[in-house]
Amino acid sequence: MSLTDSIPNNVDLGSDRKLLRALEKWQPNFIEWWKDMGPEGFQEDQIWLRTAISVDASGWANYEYVRMPEYRWGIFLTPRDERRPIGFGDEADRLAWEEVPGELRGMLRRIIVTQADTEPASVEQQRLLGKTAPSLYDLRNLFQVNVEEGRHLWAMVHLLHQYFGRDGREEAEALLQRRSGDVDKPRILSTFNERTDEWLSFFMFTMFTDRDGKYQLSALSESGFDPLARATQFMLTEEAFHLFVGETGIGRIVQRAAEATLKDPNGDARNQGAIDLPTIQKWINFWFSSAIELFGGEISSNAADYFATGLKGRHHERKKYEEHSGLRDIYSIPVVKDGRLTDEEVPLRNAMNEVLRDEYVSDCERACARWNKRIQESGLTGFELKIPSRRFNRSMGIYADHCFDLEGQIISEGEFEKRKSEWLPTAEDRAYVQSVMVPCYEPGKFAPWIAPPRKGVKGKGVDFEYVKFASSAR
Ligand SMILES: [Fe+2]
Ligand SMILES: [Fe+2]
């Protein structure tokens, strides 16, 4: 099979010699990287996976058994609207760019490379999780997320190859060289160097970290650089599945925790092999406070530049807002002055990271309300999960130099240290969570710490054989 046949695409790859040559060199290295750093121990198994073969709904619903190294990673842009205007900033209402404007080249490349780097990073972080999957359903979902992160890398590499010439090709190569957690060649953003080595963290990652990805992609899908807008629009459709995995995964663990608490004579879910609600809350506190750093500084001149130049808009810029210059409004941010929180007024453009963070926080709160509904439905009373304040446990931005409790009130460092073990995972909590991570590979069976999903994938039953193992040793 030729490369053009094996890469599903709608970018006319067959007739673009330059792009084809660049990809021909890059693709074998990608496969090498996948075999090295992709899911360890499952490369020969048949996984029931969805492959995107075109951007319309019919091309999207393509499910079949596939070995992951043979997955057909493709390149898709949502169709071009030749009259699409730039949606915001200083150039608002002029025609969107089809080529990279010279003066924005460096900035745009940095945006694309930073986004691109997170895609392989998460695959690396999750590479050992298959060994402790709580069910075949969850194992399949993990791999679906992984191959799609691989495709997101393809989407970004396509932009680098097509629009950035030689520097783009070098950046594309470097994306396969960096390694999550590596001392010498780490991934660019620190969250993507943390370990995700048990499934509670995997679901937290897909809930909170992938959700940052959703809002970053959404802001880029408004971009005046049209190919970036069209690439990210299609990525968002895949991202929605990752968020589903995270939100419902946590929901199922919460449900099981509540049921186990009720069932246990001492009200201790751990006695029933489940993960107790206070422990889940600590993971929420940790992952939310880590993911929220990814939005960048609260008051940021970079954010202002990205908006002014038309590269990065707000979530639903065209749909939700009427005023697109961002010059007329101010935004009020609580800052610490003389040991107290006081509101400071900032020009809106400089607060764009915070505007995006607001969308994210309310989305997380919506998900949390649904988890609490599961607790209520179980019949357990007296416990409610909460999304912590965005000021809690920060290591970057304007709150990093101060300590805050879960409600966002300033506290002393001593107080924070004293209460830290109530709020964040302790070594003992981590050891407990690790101890329940025992694989469950029998179709229709689930590990005791997670409830089955309400339904299976694409009309298949919950007990469908989502993964067919090549060897019977498992
Ligand atoms: Fe992604
Ligand atoms: Fe994702």
Image: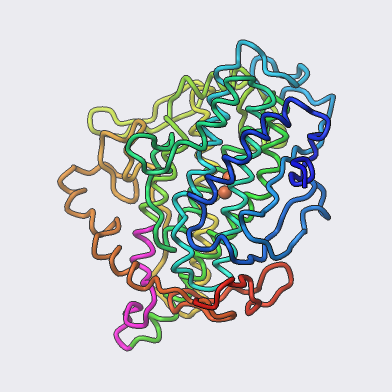
> Looking at the picture, does residue 93 appear above or below residue 75?
above
Give residue 446's position: percent from left, percent from top: 51, 78
Q: Say whether residue 25 is magenta.
A: no
Camera-nearest residue between 70 and 47: 70
Residue 370 located left or right of residue 430: right
Give residue 443's position: percent from left, percent from top: 59, 79
Q: Residue furthest left?
A: 414
Q: Residue furthest front?
A: 1
Task: Tell me what residue is drawn at x 55 percent, y 67 percent.
Answer: 138
Q: How many marks?
A: 0
Residue range of the region highlighted in magenta in the rendering? 265-283
> Looking at the picture, does residue 408 appear above or below residue 227?
below
Give residue 351's position: percent from left, percent from top: 49, 27
> Looking at the picture, does residue 237 appear above or below residue 375?
above
> Looking at the picture, does residue 340 appear above or below residue 255?
above
* Residue 89 picture quarter: top right
Task: Tell me what residue is drawn at x 37 percent, y 73 percent.
Answer: 436
Camera-nearest residue between 310 and 141: 141
Residue 320 located left or right of residue 416: right
Task: Tell me what residue is drawn at x 69 percent, y 32 percent.
Answer: 229
Give residue 200's position: percent from left, percent from top: 42, 63
Q: Residue furthest bottom?
A: 265
The structure's colour scheme is: rainbow
* Residue 335 picture quarter: top left
Q: Say whether residue 269 is magenta.
A: yes
Task: Tell me what residue is drawn at x 34 percent, y 49 percent.
Answer: 407
